[in-house]
């Protein structure tokens, strides 16, 4: 027997053995009733989005689980009598802090006129994975078009992974995506203590982890984040590395969910309009971090910036900004201060660029430029209209209080401006609909 034949025979035997083990584990799983597979991202429990209201109407179902998932108690006909638009998103779409007529969907309806019905399917505090059934409900709700304005909460979810898997989240995700469907892999991973993906959850009880870096990463990812482990507002190199890597992972997962939403809707004959997200660029970063090999100079420069006078045109502050960004150009606080200084100089373009960099490096962000880049990429790849609502961020830097209530929630005037920006694209897409 040649060496090649022996190798082929050995490979065939190995495959047969592995297949036999896998079949045995399938039987064991069925007998024990305990799943052995490791899904890369376990989905949320199924929920009902539409509840019957009489014989001819739907109403958005009452809150599912935690109180943060509030819904507008809209009641609408099962069979629409005019073109129906559904707007899906988080609290930004829901209109947190606003009365229903002031929220973005109602103002979009006003902009489109009485010939179009616009429904608010916004849900507070949630994220793309949990919005999948909400988007799916637009199909039985007979939507002609769905506006997807989502992505504000992707980075502030509870950590996906715990244990050793959390120390290299991108690698763990890729490994699970490739091998997680095999029960043998799941069994070995559990027996080795590598840890399984944590189900995305905001209302789960907080974990107490033995490793201080694990605990710091997890605490920063809680919603709301627990920042007591960062009294100076600066995370160390290892915590920063892992949080930055996890942000890249969550952006990939978000893009996958968004593609799934778009394809599901279009496959059902529903038109789609995507929107990027605005936020108050002048809001301060929640947590800065450092990627510098030597943390000491970064921490010293960061402390000097925190101690410097508030006036951005003061020489001490300018020197502190330069020192911090020289020590580490990834520190969000340094970019936020540089944006303040540029704005004080009347250079709005440089200020906006610096504030966007600050948001990009914030370790506990809401909306970020990278999320908007993912939205734009999905729109281009899937051939759907895109409305750049992030332009509101640039135009409001001089007087954010005119349009913003807080970092990501607009007031009634801000919602009106955004509705006016959305209306032409929505009207054009409705006109092209079958």
Image: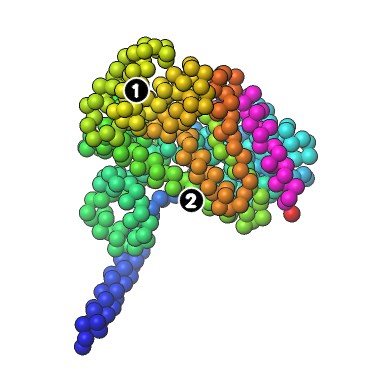
Q: Position of residue 245 (x, y in %)?
A: 35, 42
| Marker disc for residue 250 | none
Residue at 64% over, 56% down: 268
Q: Residue at x 63, y 24 (%)?
A: 412
Which comes sooner in the sequence, label 1 or label 2?
A: 2
Q: Nearer the viewer, mark 1 or mark 2?
A: 1
- Disc 1: CA contacts within 10 A as few (<14), some (14-19) or many (>=20): some
Q: Residue at x 35, y 39 (%)?
A: 244
**Viewer-proximal residue among 183 and 1:** 1
The residue to which callout 2 is attached is 256
Please name whichever residue, 325 or 15, is drawn nearer the observer in this view of the structure. 325
Image quarter in which the C terminus is found? bottom right
Residue 328 in the image: above or below residue 400: below
Q: Which residue is mark 1?
A: 322
Residue 126 x/y as whole percent: 49, 38
Magenta-drawn segment: 410-433
**Local SS, label 1:** helix
Provide residue 357's location: percent of width, then percent of height: 43, 31
């Amino acid at each position: 027997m040649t060496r090649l034949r022996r190798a082929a025979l050995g490979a065939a035997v190995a495959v047969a053995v592995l297949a036999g083990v896998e079949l045995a584990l399938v039987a064991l799983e069925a007998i024990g009733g305990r799943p052995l597979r490791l899904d890369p991202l376990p989905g949320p429990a199924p929920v009902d989005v539409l509840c019957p209201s009489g014989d001819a109407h739907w109403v958005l179902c009452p809150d599912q689980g935690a109180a943060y998932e509030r819904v507008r108690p809209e009641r609408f006909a099962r069979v629409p009598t005019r073109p129906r638009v559904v707007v899906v998103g988080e609290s930004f779409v829901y209109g947190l802090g606003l009365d229903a007529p002031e929220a973005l969907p109602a103002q979009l309806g006003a902009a489109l006129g009485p010939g179009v019905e616009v429904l608010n399917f916004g849900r507070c505090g949630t994220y793309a994975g949990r919005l999948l059934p909400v988007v799916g409900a637009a199909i039985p709700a007979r939507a002609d078009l769905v506006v997807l304005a989502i992505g504000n909460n992707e980075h502030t979810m509870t950590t996906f992974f715990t244990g050793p898997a959390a120390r290299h989240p991108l690698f763990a995700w890729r490994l699970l995506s490739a091998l997680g469907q095999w029960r043998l892999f799941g069994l070995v991973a559990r027996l080795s203590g590598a840890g399984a993906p944590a189900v995305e959850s905001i209302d789960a009880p907080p974990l107490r982890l033995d490793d201080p870096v694990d605990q710091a990463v997890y605490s920063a990812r809680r919603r709301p984040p627990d920042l007591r482990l960062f009294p100076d507002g600066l995370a160390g190199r290892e915590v920063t590395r892992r949080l930055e890597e996890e942000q890249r992972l969550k952006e990939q997962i978000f893009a996958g969910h968004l593609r799934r939403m778009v394809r599901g809707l279009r496959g059902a004959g529903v038109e789609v309009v995507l929107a990027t997200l605005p936020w108050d660029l002048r809001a301060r970063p929640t947590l800065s971090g450092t990627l510098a090999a030597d943390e000491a100079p970064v921490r010293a420069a960061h402390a000097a910036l925190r101690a410097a006078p508030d006036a951005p045109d003061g020489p001490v502050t300018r020197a502190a900004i330069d020192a911090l960004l020289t020590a580490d150009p990834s520190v969000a606080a340094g970019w936020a201060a540089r944006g303040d200084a540029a704005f004080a100089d009347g250079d709005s373009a440089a200020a906006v660029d610096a504030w966007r960099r600050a948001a990009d490096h914030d370790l506990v962000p809401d909306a970020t430029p990278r999320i908007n880049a993912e939205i734009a990429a999905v729109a281009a790849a899937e051939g759907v209209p895109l409305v750049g609502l992030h332009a509101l961020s640039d135009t409001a830097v001089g007087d954010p209080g005119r349009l913003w209530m807080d970092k990501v929630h607009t007031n009634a005037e801000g919602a009106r401006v955004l509705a006016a920006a959305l209306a032409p694209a929505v009207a054009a897409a409705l006109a092209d609909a079958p």
